[in-house]
Image: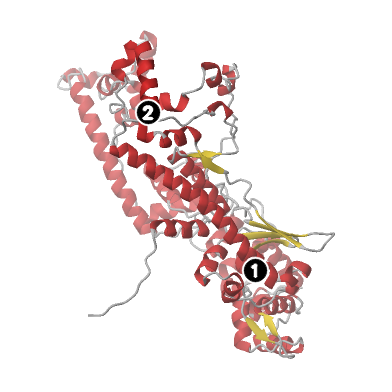
C-alpha cells in the first residue's frame, strides 16, 4: 500500500482560474450573467438611491412586537402573515421603506418612449440571394429542387466540396418524400370532393380554358378538370394560411416529381456558377476562374487568352512556368503581363464577401502608454466596461434578518449560498485585476526596449522569466497571457507576441527570433522578383547581416511567415 500527496483544487479556486483565462469581452458577459443569476449582486454604476433602506438592528422581541402591532392594525392580512407559506416575501422585503412615489420616480410619463425602436437594415444572405436568382431561370421543377440542394451545400468561401453524387442521392430522397406527401394530399382532397368521377358524362366536360372562361363569367371559383378546386382544398386544410399558393397549385395540377441524374446536376451546377457572384459553387480554383471569365459578355483579346491559359495551361500557370506559356501560345512577355493582370483581377473566393463573415475587432485588455513628460510607462487595465459589483442592499438586509423570520431551511441555505457566491465573485475580480497588472508590469519591465523604440527592441522572453519576476506559477502566467491583447504607442499586440525564442548573432548576443523573421521578410521583399533567392541564398544573405541561420531554419521561418518557395515567388516585372 502506497501513500502519496496530491493537491485538489476547490470549486472556488477553479472558478478563479477560469476568470484569469477570460478575455475582456467574455469577462464582461460573465459578470452580466452573474448579476442576472444572483440577486445578491448589484451593478454599482447605477444609482439606486430609491432602493435605500434605513435599517436599525433590533432585537427579536422588538421585531415580533412590531409585527404583531402591524397585523392588529391590518386584521384582513393576518391570515397571510405566515412566512412559511411564502418564505421569500419578495415584494414586501424589497420595497419595504419606499413609497409609491419613490417606486415611480423613474417613470418619464411618456408611453411612446417604449415604442421607439431603432430601425434595422434588412439583409439577405448569400444563399437566399442565389435561390432568388435561381428561380428566374428556365428550369424544371426537379431542377429547382436540385439547385436549392446545391446552393445549400456551398461553403462560406463559395466552393462546393460535396460530391455531386451525394447531392443527387439526397435530392431524389427529398423528391420521393414530396411525391408521397402530394399524393396523400391529392387522395385526401379527392375523397372530400363532391364530384362523381363515375359519371360517364365527364368525357363531355369543357376543357380547362373554356371552363375557366365560363367560371369568370359566372363568377364561380375555378374547378380543375380532375374535379379539384381551391375551395375544396380549403375545406380539407382549413385556414388559408396553413398552405401556400405553390402547394395548392401542386395539388390541383398533381404531377409527381421525376428523379434527377448526374447530368441534371452538372447542368444545374453550371447555371449556379453563372449566377451573381460568378464562380460561386465551383469545385476548384480552376473552375472558379473559368466561370468568372466565361461570364464576361464581350471578352477582349487578353480575357480570351486568360481563358485559354486557365483551361489548357493551368499547371504551367500555377508553377509560374511563364517561358513555356509564352512559347506554347506564341505571345510576347508584355502580352503575358497584361493577361496576368486580368487573372489577378478575378476573385478566387467568390463567397468571401458574405455578410455573415464579420470582421472580428480586437478589444485590448491592457493599455500601456509612455508618459511624454516623465518617460515612464503607464500601465492600466481596460476594464471600464466591466460592471463594478456590490451587494444588493435589499437582499443584504434580508440576509441579516433571516434569523428573525420563519424561513425554512432550504430558503436559509439559498440565501447563504447566493451571499457567499456574490462575496467570492467581488473578491475574485479584485484579485484578478491585481494579478493581471502584476504580469503586465513584469512584461513591460522585461521588454522595456520594445515600449521605447517598437518592434526592433523586442527581446527573447520565456514564460519562466515572467513567473520568476512576479512570483506566480508558470501555468498562471500562461492563463493570463493566452488570448489577451495590449494597446501600445506602436499598435495593438497579442501578449504572446512578447514571448519568443532566441538565436545568437555573430557577436554572441541572444536575439529574438521575431527580429530574425522580420529581417528575413525584409530580405525577401527586396529581392529581384525575376530571380527570387533560394533558401540557401537567403541563409548566406542573413549571415551577411549578422544572423547565422541555417538553410533548414530559413525554410522553417519562411513557412511560418507564409512565404512560398523561390519558384512560386517569381513574377514578370
**Crowding near pointer 1: few (<14 within 10 Å), some, many (20+)?**
some
Q: Position of residue 64 (x, y in %)?
A: 35, 24
Q: Outermost residue, right direction?
A: 373
Relative depth, front residue between 135 and 117: 117
Q: Nearer the viewer, mark 2 or mark 1?
A: 1
Q: Return the residue nearer the eye: 76 or 536.
A: 76
Residues at circles 2 and 1 in contact by the CB criterion of under 8 Å: no
Q: Nearer the viewer, residue 28 or 166?
A: 28
Place of residue 399 in the rendered image (x, y in percent of width and height, measured from the top left): 41, 37
Answer with left or right where residue 420 lies relative to residue 52.
left
State the CA–CA distance, disc 2 to disc 1. 67 Å
Task: Name the spot of residue 74 as percent of width and height, x first.
Answer: 36, 12
Q: Quadrant of the C terminus?
A: bottom right
- Which image quarter: residue 557? bottom right
Q: Residue at x 81, y 63 (%)?
A: 375
- Asked if residue 484 can be seen in this view, the reply is no
In what element is the residue under mark 1? helix
Point 66% across, 87% down: residue: 549
Kind of element beneath mark 2:
loop
Q: For this view, does 221 lie left or right of residue 295? A: left
- In the rendered structure, find residue 453 and report the number of the disc placed on it: none
For the N terminus, the image quarter is bottom left
Q: Which residue is mark 2?
A: 244
Residue drawn at x 51%, y 17% is 100
Q: Which residue is identified by label 1?
A: 442
Is residue 44 toward the left or the right of residue 523 in the image? left
Q: As displayed, is residue 9 above or below residue 5?
A: above
* Quarter location, residue 304: bottom right
Amino acid at each position: 500500500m502506497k501513500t502519496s500527496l496530491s493537491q485538489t483544487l476547490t470549486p472556488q479556486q477553479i472558478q478563479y482560474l477560469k476568470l484569469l483565462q477570460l478575455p475582456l469581452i467574455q469577462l464582461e458577459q460573465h459578470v452580466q450573467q452573474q448579476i442576472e443569476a444572483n440577486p445578491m449582486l448589484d451593478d454599482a454604476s447605477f444609482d439606486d438611491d430609491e432602493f435605500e433602506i434605513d435599517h436599525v438592528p433590533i432585537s427579536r422581541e422588538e421585531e415580533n412586537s412590531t409585527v404583531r402591532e402591524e397585523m392588529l392594525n391590518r386584521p384582513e392580512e393576518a391570515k397571510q402573515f405566515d412566512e412559511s407559506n411564502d418564505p421569500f416575501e419578495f415584494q414586501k422585503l424589497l420595497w419595504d421603506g419606499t413609497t409609491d412615489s419613490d417606486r415611480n420616480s423613474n417613470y418619464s410619463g411618456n408611453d411612446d418612449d417604449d415604442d421607439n425602436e431603432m430601425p434595422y437594415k434588412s439583409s439577405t444572405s448569400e444563399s437566399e440571394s442565389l435561390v432568388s436568382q435561381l428561380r428566374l431561370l428556365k428550369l424544371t421543377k426537379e431542377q429547382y429542387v436540385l439547385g436549392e440542394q446545391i446552393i445549400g451545400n456551398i461553403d462560406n468561401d463559395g466552393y462546393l466540396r460535396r460530391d455531386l453524387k451525394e447531392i443527387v442521392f439526397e435530392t431524389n430522397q427529398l423528391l420521393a418524400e414530396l411525391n408521397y406527401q402530394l399524393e396523400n394530399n391529392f387522395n385526401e382532397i379527392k375523397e372530400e370532393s363532391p364530384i362523381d368521377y363515375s359519371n360517364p358524362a365527364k368525357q363531355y366536360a369543357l376543357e380547362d380554358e373554356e371552363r375557366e372562361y365560363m367560371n369568370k363569367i359566372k363568377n364561380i371559383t375555378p374547378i380543375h378538370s380532375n374535379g379539384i378546386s381551391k375551395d375544396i382544398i380549403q375545406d380539407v386544410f382549413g385556414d388559408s394560411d396553413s398552405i401556400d399558393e405553390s402547394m395548392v397549385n401542386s395539388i390541383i395540377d398533381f404531377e409527381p416529381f421525376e428523379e434527377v441524374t448526374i447530368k441534371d446536376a452538372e447542368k444545374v451546377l453550371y447555371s449556379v456558377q453563372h449566377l451573381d457572384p460568378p464562380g460561386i459553387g465551383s469545385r476548384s480554383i480552376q473552375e472558379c476562374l473559368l466561370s468568372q471569365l466565361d461570364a464576361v459578355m464581350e471578352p477582349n483579346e487578353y480575357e480570351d487568352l486568360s481563358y485559354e491559359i486557365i483551361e489548357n495551361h493551368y499547371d504551367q500557370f500555377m508553377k509560374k512556368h511563364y517561358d513555356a506559356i509564352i512559347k506554347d501560345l506564341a505571345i510576347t512577355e508584355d502580352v503575358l503581363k497584361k493577361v496576368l493582370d486580368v487573372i489577378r483581377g478575378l476573385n478566387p473566393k467568390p463567397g468571401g464577401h458574405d455578410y455573415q463573415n464579420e470582421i472580428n475587432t480586437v478589444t485590448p485588455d491592457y493599455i500601456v502608454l509612455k508618459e511624454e513628460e516623465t518617460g515612464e510607462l503607464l500601465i492600466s487595465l481596460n476594464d471600464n466596461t466591466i460592471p463594478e459589483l456590490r451587494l444588493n442592499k435589499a437582499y443584504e438586509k434580508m440576509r441579516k434578518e433571516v434569523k428573525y423570520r420563519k424561513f425554512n431551511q432550504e430558503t436559509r441555505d439559498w440565501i447563504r449560498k447566493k451571499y457567499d457566491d456574490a462575496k467570492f465573485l467581488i473578491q475574485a475580480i479584485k484579485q484578478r485585476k491585481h494579478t493581471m497588472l502584476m504580469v503586465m508590469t513584469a512584461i513591460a519591465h522585461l521588454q522595456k526596449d520594445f515600449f521605447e523604440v517598437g518592434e526592433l527592441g523586442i527581446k527573447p522572453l520565456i514564460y519562466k522569466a515572467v513567473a520568476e519576476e512576479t512570483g506566480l506559477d508558470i501555468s498562471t502566467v500562461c492563463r493570463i497571457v493566452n488570448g489577451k491583447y495590449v494597446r501600445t504607442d506602436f499598435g495593438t499586440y497579442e501578449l504572446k507576441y512578447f514571448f519568443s525564442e532566441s538565436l545568437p548573432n555573430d557577436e554572441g548576443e541572444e536575439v529574438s527570433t521575431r527580429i530574425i523573421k522580420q529581417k528575413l521578410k525584409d530580405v525577401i521583399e527586396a529581392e529581384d522578383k525575376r530571380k527570387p533567392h533560394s533558401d540557401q541564398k537567403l541563409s548566406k544573405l542573413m549571415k551577411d547581416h549578422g544572423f547565422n541561420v541555417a538553410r533548414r531554419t530559413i525554410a522553417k521561418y519562411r513557412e511560418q511567415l507564409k512565404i512560398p518557395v523561390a519558384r512560386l515567388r517569381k513574377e514578370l516585372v
